[in-house]
Amino acid sequence: MLRGSRTDRRAEQPTNARGPGDRLNQFSRFGNSRSHRTSNAVTLGVYSCSSPNDELPQGAHMAALATSSQDRWLDLNDVLRDLVAEGYLGQDDAETALTQRRSAVNIQLHPLEFLASLQFDDLKRPGKKLDLETLTAWLAKACGQPYMRIDPLKINVAAVTPLMSYAFAQRHKILAVAVDRESVTIASAQPYVRSWEGDLAHVLKLQIKRVVANPTDIQRMAMEFFRLAKSVSGASASEQKMSNMGNFEQLLKLGASDQEPDANDAHIVNIVDWLFQYAFQQRASDIHIEPRREQGTVRFRIDGVLHNVYQFPAQVIMAIVSRLKSLGRMNVAEKRKPQDGRVKTTTPENREVELRLS
């Protein structure tokens, strides 16, 4: 997609010729694109042509949005105009998309999610469809922001979830994906909405770096990350009496006290369920739970390589182990002898899976 100012081509073509600008002007009559005709002008969204024969450069609408100082939620009409102009999508498919968009089910979807669900042919890649990742990468290029495919295994969930509330993330459709001493990287599928940047930068005292990511991934990861963080926080609070085990003698007293972590606590149940579902999504072959004195680590083995997934407080990791022992019909009180067990559960696709526990 090219970004630049409109070029006047009237001197180069006859007044009765039909150019790419005409195709876009024709397209403006479909849907609710807010286009209108005057005596000698056609207005399309935020771009205007002095004549129906003026040619709009590729990406003109997206480029105009990128330079606008006002917030603008991504509109299907803007997306379709540029996709048609750049040759990704046919005119008939664009009209079909506008017609189907009017249904109550589709109106709530992000424009890119909606287009991907229609599975139109990608005219620039014969034999392939316009999928969500292709559209997201196209949008990133159009707005001049980096494209990012979110890999949850590379995100420090414990570090990014405290940066903003779940309500703030949901309201602005954003997700923090990385943070360091100087900056925080925020993923968004609405690159032309900027009102939240000032508030977040003021609170965090960090530079805001923006990337464009798949809207489905942003929504799903936000729900999973914040739900996990809430469960860990709740489990830590319920076991806070155990959080200050500073020596071996205190650890020995644990078994005789009434402070044994509750494996059936709702927060612990949620954490274990999340670990199972997350492992299925990432196609992990093994889940390694490694208790330590101060902090325990959960790692997934994926394609033979171990990846760090999350670090839990020591008392939470012990409760997770107890929960797994209970599910595998092991002796929860036995902490010295090796034990084996099995657990049957279902994947997000409702496939039954049997897990071996050791």
Image (spheres, grey):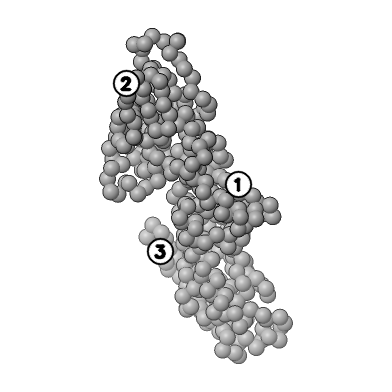
Seen as rendered, the residue at the extreme front is 39
Which image quadrant is residue 123 in? Answer: top left
Say what secondary structure mark 1 lies in. Answer: strand
Q: Position of residue 64 (x, y in %)?
A: 49, 32
Q: Is residue 307 visible?
A: no
The quadrant the C terminus occupies is: bottom right
Q: Position of residue 332 (x, y in %)?
A: 53, 81
Residue labelled with disc 1: 209
Residue 259 to residue 14: above or below: below
**Crowd tier of the residue under label 1, counting other residues whose Cα lies within 10 Å: few below 14, some 14–19, many 20 or above:** some
Of residue 209 and residue 257, the one placed in the foreground of this image is 209
Verify CB contact (< 8 Å) between mark 2 and mark 1: no
The span from disc 2 to disc 1 (Cα, nearest Å) is: 45 Å
The span from disc 3 to disc 2 (Cα, nearest Å) is: 64 Å
**Residue at left offset 41%, top offset 26%:** 48
For marks 3 and 2, the one nearer the N-term is 2
Going by the numbered disc 2, the residue's amino acid type is Ser
**Crowd tier of the residue under label 2, counting other residues whose Cα lies within 10 Å: few below 14, some 14–19, many 20 or above:** few
Residue labelled with disc 2: 39
Q: Nearer the viewer, mark 1 or mark 3?
A: 1
